[in-house]
Image (cartoon, rainbow, N blue to C red):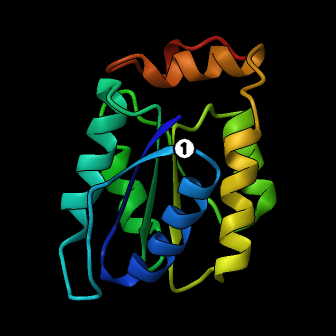
Amino acid sequence: MKIAIGSDHGGFELKEEIRGLLTGLGHQVMDVGCHSPDSVDYPIQGREVAESVASGRCERGVLVCGTGIGMSIVANRVPGIRATLCHDLFTARMGREHNDSNILCMGGRVIEPGLAKEMVKVWLMTPFKGGRHSRRINMIDLPEQKNDSFEAH
């Protein structure tokens, strides 16, 4: 699988750990930076990873900043992206099963590397369940759709 990965300075060290894991698992990794712990503006890397996934150049993406919050906000501004901010194995699995997450966001200052690596593995291996979740994904993807026009299920 081709996976885009990016971080800011707050996520640099964890990004490097995850990049090594992905390469070791046989994935092709497109690292958009940052490439050192020097301060950078996270929207640059966040947008580049999101656009790589949305365009189909990469199948999935991983973004890491200090908390994961900023990266998830940036990525979810790109149409077609479902970036999930995860903190444990359960949220990583649910992000794939229920939300068909195509970008995993994590906080380099809040998650230790061992857990982060396990989260990445779970996120990569978990399939989307489909069914009622597909209907909900379609509702999210409808542009400018108002909530009151949705049928409750």
Amino acid type shown at disc 1: His
What residue is shown at x 21% (from left), y 88% (from top)? 38
Residue appearing at x 76%, y 47% in the figure: 93
Residue linked to disc 1: 27
For mark 1, does the 10 Å Cα neighbourhood hold few (<14), some (14 to 19), or many (20 or more) residues?
some
Element type at mark 1: loop
Say if residue 153 shows up in the picture.
Answer: no
Locate residue 152: give its quadrant: top right
Q: In the picture provided, is 141 more to the left or to the right than 35?
A: right
Q: Position of residue 51 (x, y in %)?
A: 26, 37
Is residue 124 shown to the viewer in this render?
yes
How many marks the image carries: the answer is 1
Task: Look at the picture and state if 86 lies above or below 113.
Answer: above
Residue 61: x and y in percent read: 45, 46
In the picture, measured across the screen, residue 44 lies left or right of residue 125, that is left
**Closest to the observer, 105 or 98:** 105
Tell me the quarter of the image containing the C terminus. Answer: top right
Query: Image quadrant of residue 81?
Result: top left
Q: Where is residue 65, by image quadrant?
A: bottom left
